[in-house]
Image (cartoon, rainbow, N blue to C red):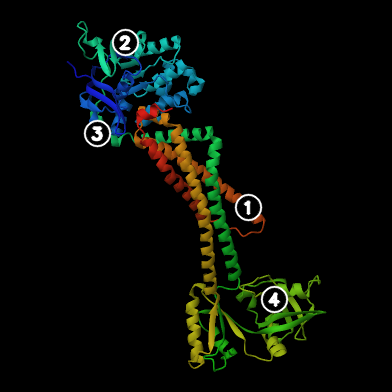
Amino acid sequence: MQTPLIDLRGIRKAYGGNDSPLVEVLRGIDLSIHAGEFVAIVGASGSGKSTLMNILGCLDRPTSGEYLFAGENVARLDSDELAWLRREAFGFVFQGYHLIPSGSAQENVEMPAIYAGTPAAERHARAAALLDRLGLASRTGNRPHQLSGGQQQRVSIARALMNGGHIILADEPTGALDSHSGAEVMTLLDELASQGHVVILITHDRDVAQRANRLIEIRDGLIISDTADAPSAPPRSARPGALQAVDLRQRLSVGSENTGAWKGELVDAVQAAWRVMWINRFRTALTLLGIVIGVASVVVMLAVGEGSKRQVMAQMGAFGSNIIYLSGAAPNPRTPPGIITLDDVAALAALPQVQRIMPVNGATAGVRFGNVDHTSYVGGNDTNFPVIFNWPVVEGRYFTQADEDTGAAVAVIGKKVRDKLLKDVADPIGQYILIENVPFQVLGVLAEKGSSSGDSDSDNRIAVPYSAASVRLFGNRNPEYVVIAAKDARKVKEAEQAIEQTMLHRHKDKKDFELTNNAAMIQAEARTQGTLSLMLGSIAAISLLVGGIGVMNIMLMTVRERTREIGIRMATGARQRDILRQFLTEAVMLSVIGGLAGIGLALLVGGVLLLSDVAVAFEWIAVFGAFGCALVTGVIFGFMPARKAARLDPVTALTSE
């Protein structure tokens, strides 16, 4: 006699125990089913027939006893191998249809093939052919709520046949149908049995059960009758044309299944996620709000911080990041400051590390125009002034070398001086101002520079020829200080060392001078601004954390609402990692959409701030970083709900309300 396709030996199933009462549903079931049989298991509600079906379909495990499939013990299979067996061998037809509400008829039918890794084109063609065969060719795009009960049951039969459906497990397939639809479904099951499928029909209706070739009655968890045991019954063997049993040895390659499976599953997961998000769009919008605000806050805060940093750095850099200042200093408190001479300036100008050098002879002086008095810094400079300070003239011109050589009484004024003294004069060029009662003709107005630090204001400055300052104003040829532009801004320290060595040599190793530069100040300011930006970004990142918690909450709610869908997917062959991927994909989609919307909002806010003259500088690394953080947040906070979904018991999930 041929080995039974299904062989149950002493199967028992009990629920409860520990702190709850122990309820034994199956109390020792012995049952053999061969290939090609059409079997009806009949019994009243509570007799244990649905529990038996769940064990037959590998949705549940028995408390004790043996379940042999094609001679192999099913107890040795892990959860993924059981999923493989359900996918390859079984097709389920449920009383409540158990179709995924958000999927079309075609998508519901294709589901088992997705988990089997069937290529998309082949999958679509087979699903369409099955629906056409069952009279639903015009309904492939309809969702379950757009189909009648009979049509939904035919969709579930097509789904059961998608991967071959060697064994059709039909649990009360006509229970929710009218008589006409019920008759149609039973005709389909008769046809499938005649084609060699094993059909196991679970019902309480004896009239429906009479359609089967073999009738098994179950009561109180025990088989009380089986027509196959009748003396006139034919020997149990495979009928001609019966489908071959699935070879359980193939499960050994369950870890290396068709590599195309993940692509189909991912597409299905994305489509399902989008449908769920759209159906619950108000709730989705509220969830996305946390991520959107979080991403936008991070991007805008970092952009404002970076913009402020660049603005400050630009203002400070305008004063020269490669500039070194040389001035006299007292070697100790009891000695006078050293004197820098023009000969020292000439010696330093010859150093290879020096690009330009300019002596400055200046002091704060009183300035007058008409009846208006003002106090300003007046500096005697040479023609290197605009280049060495990167300070152009916006009105008129700068004085020339000829003006320097002749000691001409000409001046170039700063923006603040122009506003204080000549605000009512349309054209200041050619006007005369009094500096310490000496008339100087205005040749030009310097561009606005702003403050470098503290209360100092570079725009409150007047530049005059060095010779004119020395002779006409201060009566001293030696510079107050010397401005030196290093040849390489990255090697300011090397230039300082060369200058120091030259000065020590010229001053007989007496350190009666002092060297300072803007580079250290600029670097310190950059560090301060960087710390501020980081602090602002960190504060804004809290919004992302709140958004992540929102994702977790919505995913937990989604898992609870879609528990039955999870059971349906498991019944059609989904593994734990498939369910995990499904819900992680939804969490990631929420994060991706929220992240993109957050970036869009950040750019919009940034544009408004720019129009409001707020310094804003978007950096791609900050934008991508915020988006990446949103993505990671979605994965982290979506993982726990996804894992919870993946670990659900298939039977518990299917019977959930």
Gap in angstroms between the C-alphas marked 4 and 2:
105 Å
Gap in angstroms between the C-alphas marked 2 and 3:
35 Å
Sequence-wise first label, 3 or 1: 3
Q: Is residue 284 or residue 27 the one in the foreground?
A: 27
Q: Which residue is mark 3?
A: 252
Sequence-wise first label, 4 or 2: 2
The part of the image, by quadrant, that contains residue 435 is bottom right
Q: Secondary structure at mark 3?
A: helix
Position of 308 compared to 62: left or right? Answer: right
Q: Residue at x 58, y 60 (%)?
A: 307
Q: Residue at x 46, y 41 (%)?
A: 587
- Do the residues under discs 2 and 1 have CB atoms within 8 angstroms? no
Please name which of the two marks, 4 or 2, marks the residue nearer to the observer. 2
Q: Secondary structure at mark 2?
A: loop
Gap in angstroms between the C-alphas marked 1 and 4:
33 Å
Sequence-wise first label, 1 or 4: 4
Q: Position of residue 475 (x, y in %)?
A: 69, 91
Q: Which residue is mark 1?
A: 607
Q: Which residue is mark 4?
A: 460
Q: Residue at x 42, y 40 (%)?
A: 641
CA neighbours of label 3 inside 10 A, class few (<14), some (14 to 19), many (20+): few
Q: Is residue 100 or residue 339 the one in the foreground?
A: 100
Q: Secondary structure at mark 1?
A: helix
Q: Which residue is mark 2?
A: 212
